[in-house]
Image (cartoon, grey):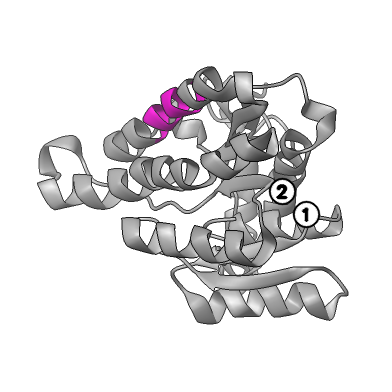
Amino acid sequence: MTGGAGPRIGSGICRALAEAGWHVVVTDIDMPSARKVDQALRDDGLSAESLELDTSDHDSVLAAVGQVLETHGNVHGLVNSAGIGLTTPADQLADEDYEHVVGTDLRGPWWCAQAVIPSMKAAGGGSIVNIGSVHALSTFPGNSLYSAAKSGLVGLTRGIASDYGGFGIRCNIIHPGLVACDADFEQAHESGVDVLDRWQVDRQLLNRRITGIDIGRAAEFLLSDAAGAITGAQLVVDAGTSSMLVDREAALW
């Protein structure tokens, strides 16, 4: 599980998978936070460990996957959740911005998949879940680079599914909607106004928050045998955001 320390999506996926019975390897570039996620899961009697992994560094990817294989013998499932965003108009982007965003959001999942596929082939199968974004379907101003990287991840997902389906390896992608963490809401609520809640639900069809656990349950399904006939697919978990033309409030009459 890459990006497992993420407070919005990563940690939620780790918890959902651990609660479903998976042994979760929480990997992240932020080791103190990864250890906190790992410890919280183990405190609840769940199976987890943490490991440092920088998905923008090929040597780090190979070292982390190598350590997991040495310890456990195989990787049954991979969730590529590590990612970064950047809100900058297209004409103001620099080459280093491209390297930073695309290197993490697209090349990182490619490297991680490359590293685990040989062991999955040897084991007779496995499942890879990439975490995309609704920005691969529609986007906001200033997100051209992020949208491009997540759109590229859709193509990578289909390519892996095509290349390795004959080996029993499935690859799918989840597109989360607007996911906020508890700290975001606590900060927004300090003023006594549900600003963040209102902003989020006005951009959804469902009047509820999307949580990291929601994304995690979708990932657990795609990793499981229940999704054994699903590969190369896109699963949108956005409470209806990508089905809207305007804010919900503007459409009510």
Q: Position of residue 199 (x, y in %)?
A: 56, 47
Magenta: main secondary structure: helix
Which residue shows up at 11% across the image and 37% down it?
Answer: 91
Q: Is 128 left, or right, of 214 in this rendering?
A: left
Q: Nearer the viewer, residue 25 or 66?
A: 66
Q: Position of residue 200 (x, y in %)?
A: 60, 45
Q: Is 98 left, or right, of 226 in this rendering?
A: left
Quadrant position of residue 217: top right
Q: Nearer the viewer, residue 187 or 219?
A: 219
Q: Which mark is residue 16?
A: 1
Residue 157 shown in magenta: yes
Which residue shows up at 61% across the image and 72% down it?
Answer: 50
Residue 58 shown in magenta: no
| Lower position in the chain sequence, tag 1 or tag 2 | 1
Amino acid on which the number 1 mark rests in the picture = Ala
Q: Is residue 109 visible?
A: yes
| As drawn, 35 above or below 142 | below
To which residue does mark 2 refer?
A: 216
Which residue shows up at 60% across the image and 47% down it?
Answer: 79
Which residue shows up at 64% across the image and 67% down it?
Answer: 71
Q: Check if mark 1's residue and mark 2's residue have beta carbons within 8 Å.
A: yes
Q: Which residues are magenta?
A: 150-158
Q: Which element type, helix, strand or loop, lies under badge 2?
A: helix
Q: Position of residue 116 (x, y in %)?
A: 53, 46
| As drawn, 7 above or below 58 | below
Identify the image quadrant of the N terminus: bottom right
- Number of numbered callouts drawn: 2
| As drawn, 82 above or below 34 | above
Amino acid on which the number 2 mark rests in the picture = Gly
Q: Which element type, helix, strand or loop, lies under badge 1?
A: helix
Identify the image quadrant of the C terminus: top right
